[in-house]
Image (spheres, rainbow, N blue to C red):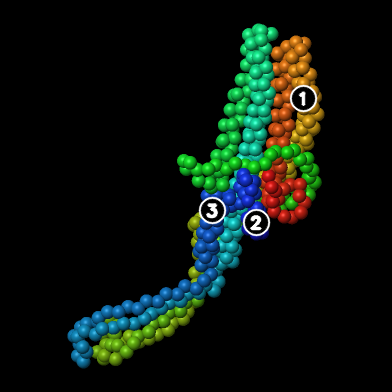
């Protein structure tokens, strides 16, 4: 099912029209094609198919054939001194009863399923990293643009102060304060620019892009907009327990450990094999060595077919099998404890994410109301400052409050998107947006 989802995701993205900039769908599709960890996990699935043959080999027949040839010599009455010979012989063995056969066949199938689920876990992990890096790049770029726009306002204020200083209406102290206000945003803008570059580098690495000198780095397209969400926690928790790839992988590992224990314990039971042996001798004078017969016809080797059954049973263990069984039992119990820990943590994780949604929504509502007040306050303080009724400190404080409020709204939108990505990962529904109840793949256009 997961493989089908990945294929559908690729088809949906491939059919979208080419647009300037990198969309989130484009980034996910390129990662599915070029991400090195995903490619390595795909190769592991092919390797698991070969390992399945190894596990299933205990139930299959074993046949061998060889054809010795040579020259038999010696002096004997009525016999040539050197006689060439050649013959063919073969053997066949088929297990009739072996307690490890059913467990080995099941273990081989589980090996392939484990590799497939490891591929799914790797895909989800890499796509989640790309989604977080994509949102981080949008956030840092928007934060840089917000700082530059605010600095532009302060630069205009600085130009006005320079004109006033040239006219002699203000002193040098007022000009110095205006210069300080305009320049104090430079470190914040540079920090946002560096963070944007780091996010772009992480995004390009996860997509498997070429990072050689002169390579073109991706440029994410879109903006961060706050979208309120609401989820039924109970049904989402139940669905997460069923469809999360890491939980399915943990369950398969428990099953594999149980089958491994059964394979080890199969040595306690008897084993019965059907055996066949055949030898074909052409018309030659090949004779058995060491024969004391004086007649030439009594010691000739002839063709033969032998059939029988082999029966083996380990009666005295001496701790070899029982010790291995205890070790494998401890592995199985540890895996079961880890699975239980993962399953019990799902409800707590989703409850924590739901609480984050409520907190982010409340913060965004309060900041949305505060930004209108901050904008009006800046306009009033700026007008009063120009009339000489307010100080530079009041104007600077108003501008700082406005920038912090706008930055808080932007951060709330970023936290909302990253929390939605965490929700999609925690619920095992990573190929569609959380607010879309229809069972289709993730196909947003950022």
Let me know if residue 359 appears in the view: no
Instruction: Identify the residue at horizontal 78%, vertical 45% (top origin).
Output: 231
From mark 2 to mark 1, how far is it between C-alphas? 44 Å
Instruction: Identify the residue at horizontal 57%, vertical 35% (top origin).
Output: 197
Q: Which mark is residue 15?
A: 2
The image position of residue 190, as x and y in percent, is 58, 28
In-front residue for pair 120/229: 229
From mark 1 to mark 3, how far is it between C-alphas? 51 Å
Q: How many marks?
A: 3
Q: Secondary structure at mark 1?
A: helix
- Sequence order check: which comes first, mark 2 or mark 1? 2
Q: Which mark is residue 428?
A: none
Q: Which residue of the protein is positioned furthest toward the front in this rendering? A: 167
Category of crowding for the residue at label 3, using alpha-carbon neighbours closer than 10 angstroms: few (below 14), some (14–19), many (at least 20)? some
- Is there CB contact under 8 Å for labels 3 and 2? no
The residue to which callout 3 is attached is 39
Let me know if residue 191 appears in the view: yes
The image position of residue 70, as x and y in percent, is 27, 79
Category of crowding for the residue at label 1, using alpha-carbon neighbours closer than 10 angstroms: few (below 14), some (14–19), many (at least 20)? some
Instruction: Identify the residue at horizontal 47%, vertical 74% (top origin).
Output: 93
The image position of residue 364, as x and y in percent, is 77, 33
Q: Is residue 208 left or right of residue 142?
A: left
The residue to which callout 1 is attached is 375
User: Where on the picture, by quarter, is residue 224?
Assistant: top right
In-front residue for pair 175/210: 175
- Sequence order check: which comes first, mark 1 or mark 3? 3
Vertical side of 393 occupied by 290: above or below: below
């Amino acid at each position: 099912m997961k493989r089908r989802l990945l294929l559908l995701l690729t088809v949906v993205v491939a059919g979208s029209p080419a647009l300037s900039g990198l969309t989130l769908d484009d980034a996910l599709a390129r990662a599915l094609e070029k991400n090195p960890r995903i490619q390595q996990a795909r190769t592991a699935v092919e390797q698991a198919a070969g390992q399945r043959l190894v596990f299933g080999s205990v139930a299959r027949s074993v046949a061998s054939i060889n054809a010795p040839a040579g020259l038999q010599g010696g002096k004997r009455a009525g016999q040539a001194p050197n006689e060439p010979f050649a013959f063919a012989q073969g053997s066949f063995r088929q297990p009739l009863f072996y307690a490890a056969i059913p467990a080995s066949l099941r273990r081989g199938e589980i090996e392939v399923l484990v590799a497939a689920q490891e591929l799914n876990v790797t895909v989800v992990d890499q796509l989640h990293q790309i989604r977080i890096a994509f949102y981080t790049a949008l956030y840092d770029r928007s934060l840089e643009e917000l700082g530059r726009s605010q600095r532009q306002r302060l630069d205009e204020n600085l130009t006005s102060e320079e004109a006033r200083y040239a006219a002699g209406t203000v002193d040098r102290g007022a000009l110095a304060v205006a210069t300080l206000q305009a320049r104090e945003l430079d470190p914040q803008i540079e920090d946002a620019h560096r963070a944007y570059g780091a996010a772009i580098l992480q995004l390009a690495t996860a997509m498997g892009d070429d990072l050689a000198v002169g390579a073109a780095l991706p440029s994410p397209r879109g903006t961060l907009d706050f979208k309120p969400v609401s989820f039924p926690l109970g049904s989402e928790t139940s669905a997460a327990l069923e469809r999360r790839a890491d939980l399915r992988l943990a369950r398969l590992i428990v099953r594999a450990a149980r089958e491994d224990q059964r394979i080890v314990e199969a040595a306690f039971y008897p084993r019965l094999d059907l055996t066949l042996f055949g030898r074909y001798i052409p018309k030659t004078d090949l004779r058995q060595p060491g024969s004391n017969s004086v007649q030439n016809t009594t010691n000739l080797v002839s063709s033969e077919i032998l059939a029988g059954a082999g029966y083996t049973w380990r009666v005295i263990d001496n701790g070899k099998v029982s010790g291995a069984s205890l070790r494998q039992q401890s592995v199985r119990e540890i895996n079961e404890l880890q699975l239980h820990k993962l399953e019990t943590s799902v409800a707590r994780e989703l409850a924590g994410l739901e609480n984050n949604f409520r907190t982010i929504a409340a913060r965004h509502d309060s900041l949305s109301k505060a930004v209108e007040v901050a904008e009006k306050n800046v306009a009033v303080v700026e007008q009063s400052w120009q009339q000489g009724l307010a100080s530079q400190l009041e104007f600077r404080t108003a501008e700082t409050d406005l920038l912090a409020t706008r930055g808080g709204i932007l951060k709330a939108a970023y936290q909302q998107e990253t929390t939605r990505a965490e929700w999609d990962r925690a619920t095992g529904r990573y190929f569609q947006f959380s607010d879309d109840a229809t069972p289709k793949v993730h196909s947003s256009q950022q």
